[in-house]
Image: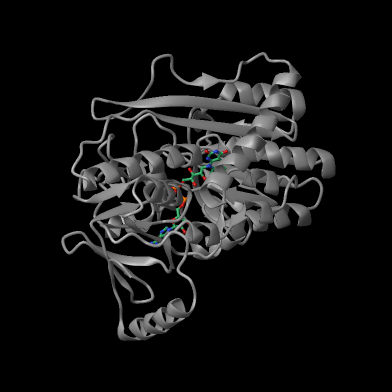
């Protein structure tokens, strides 16, 4: 196993695996005998990077470390909350990635030694690397909302990095009596997928309109404005009049305290009692970024925009939501694009070449009703040591478009989801 220092037990297991391998034909694409790259995090960033690295140079031995055997994709998960689709459509295993010749270790990374160039997993395995890629997604900043602890999270879940919480909110909505108030708290930026809280409000409103019409949705926002706000608000007016109330920062939208027992949410101005509460706290890079020494005081990871190599640790690259990537949004689309660019850069660096300056893309669709979507697309290039929006700025859905345009975007959103999950996990 290239790049792995095994414990005695693992050595015995791998000896048994070796005997099995002698009895059965080798996989079609065997691990390379060349340099070893370890990738932590098998989400949109890490899994894309692993696949792109194998394609870029099959001699590179690629090991993907992932904490969970099943990955739950968050794009389209708001449609699960709205009752349009099932959680199983969001879930993917790692078998196809394994059969692409990538060594997959299903155990959380618990330590990184940047000097010794090694990663330790919870099961005791130690992996050595020439280059490490870190793509752990986000976690929630502790202590930002008074009373919001692990127990409160089980009652008022974020459903922002955990598939089981998506299913929980869905069940809570089904169990809620007609006339109940659903409260969503939307965090400050930077955060994962800026339009997601408003797409979620739309999907919940769709469910309430069709099944529990006396109910309503309140969005408490820690921001003064939000992405594609005019488009969302015009659609809400048209599709869900009076059903969604948005409370911005200056109207007292910033959540400061919760009482999980009574499902009471307090801001500096008011108290709200929710039948269902979806608390989305402020965020930072996943914990392993701190363990690897690649997160700065902001909680996010500064990187070189051409190679995604950390500005704090040599030979460690950070991609996806954890990275500070200038104007690029924290999206699956961006993470996928960054995974491919980072893989090309690593292959070039390992071959002693200089990677060229890249161009990256991101497209983000928001479903407002089953046949009604809006989107924001962008192209990004390095400028002044950061990613800047390419000339012309983002391409956003037109404000006054006929219903057919929104319908076509809903179909595009579906096609985009199938294409990206097929390319990364299929
Ligand atoms: C409700 C919602 C809707 C969204 N909709 C869209 C959309 O429409 N379009 C879009 O482009 N994006 C969307 N996103 C954003 C998208 O989900 C993220 O931007 C994307 O998943 C980021 O990819 P990533 O690789 O950085 O992190 P993730 O996809 O979260 O992957 C991180 C992985 O790392 C693993 N991990 C973490 N720590 C460790 C460790 N120590 N050891 C091993 N493994 C570890 C985790 O288990 C996880 O599998 C949405 C997000 C949400 C919450």
Please tell me which residue lies in front, 4 or 107. Answer: 4
Q: Position of residue 268 (x, y in %)?
A: 49, 40
Residue sitting at 44 percent across and 18 percent down? 393
* Front in this rendered view, residue 358 or 209: 358
Residue displayed at 40% across by 62% down: 30
Which x, y percent locates residue 312?
20, 47
Percent across and percent down for residue 64 are 40, 59
| Residue 419, quarter of picture | top right
Q: How many marks?
A: 0
Question: Which of the colour schemes (rainbow, by chain, secondary structure, one colour) is used?
Answer: one colour
Any part of residue 242 in sight: yes
Q: Is residue 302 visible?
A: no
Q: Is residue 404 left or right of residue 28?
A: right
Q: Say which of 224 and 80 sits in front.
A: 80
Residue drawn at the location 42% of the way across and 59% of the way down: 102
* For residue 260, above or below residue 239: below
Judge whether 170 appears above or below 360 on screen.
below
Quarter of the image where the N terminus is located: bottom left
User: Residue drawn at (38%, 76%), measured in percent from left and top?
Assistant: 123
353 in relation to 21, above or below: above
Residue most extreme to the left: 115
Identify the image quadrant of residue 243: top right
Q: In this picture, is 114 found above or below 230? A: below
Where does residue 101 sit, x and y in percent of width and height?
44, 59
């Amino acid at each position: 196993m290239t790049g792995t220092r095994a414990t005695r037990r693992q050595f015995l297991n791998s000896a048994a695996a070796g005997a099995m391998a002698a009895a059965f034909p080798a996989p079609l694409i065997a691990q390379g005998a060349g340099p070893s790259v370890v990738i932590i995090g098998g989400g949109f960033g890490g899994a894309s990077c692993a696949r792109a690295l194998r394609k870029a140079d099959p001699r590179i031995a690629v090991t993907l470390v992932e904490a969970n055997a099943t990955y739950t994709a968050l794009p389209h998960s708001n449609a699960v909350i709205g009752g349009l689709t099932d959680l199983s459509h969001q879930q993917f295993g790692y078998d196809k990635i394994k059969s692409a010749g990538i060594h997959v270790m299903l155990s959380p990374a618990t330590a990184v030694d940047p000097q010794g160039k090694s990663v330790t997993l919870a099961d005791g395995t130690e992996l050595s690397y020439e280059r490490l890629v870190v793509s752990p997604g986000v976690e929630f900043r502790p202590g930002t909302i008074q009373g919001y602890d692990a127990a409160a999270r089980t009652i008022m879940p974020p459903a922002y990095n955990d598939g089981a919480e998506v299913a929980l909110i869905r069940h809570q909505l089904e169990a809620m009596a007609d006339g109940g108030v659903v409260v969503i708290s939307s965090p400050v930026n930077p955060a994962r997928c800026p339009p997601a809280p408003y797409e979620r409000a739309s999907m919940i409103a769709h469910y309430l309109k069709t099944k529990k019409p006396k109910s309503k949705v309140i969005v408490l926002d820690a921001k003064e404005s939000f992405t594609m706000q005019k488009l969302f608000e015009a659609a809400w007016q048209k599709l869900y009049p009076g059903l969604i109330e948005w409370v911005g920062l200056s109207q007292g939208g910033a959540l400061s305290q919760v009482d999980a027992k009574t499902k009471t949410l307090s801001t500096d101005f008011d108290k709200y009692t929710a039948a269902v509460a979806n608390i989305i706290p402020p965020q930072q890079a996943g914990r392993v970024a701190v363990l690897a020494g690649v997160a700065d005081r902001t909680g996010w990871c500064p990187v070189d925009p051409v190679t995604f190599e950390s500005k704090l640790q040599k030979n460690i690259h950070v991609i996806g939501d954890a990275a500070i990537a200038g104007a690029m949004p924290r999206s699956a689309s961006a993470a996928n694009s960054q995974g491919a660019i980072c893989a090309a850069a690593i292959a070039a660096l390992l071959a002693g070449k200089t990677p060229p300056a890249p161009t990256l893309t991101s497209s983000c669709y928001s479903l407002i009703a089953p046949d009604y979507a809006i989107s924001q697309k962008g192209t990004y290039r390095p400028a002044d040591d950061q990613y800047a929006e390419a000339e012309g700025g983002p391409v956003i859905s037109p404000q006054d478009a006929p219903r057919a345009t929104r319908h076509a975007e809903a179909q595009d959103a579906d096609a985009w989801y199938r294409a990206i999950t097929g390319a990364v996990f299929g």
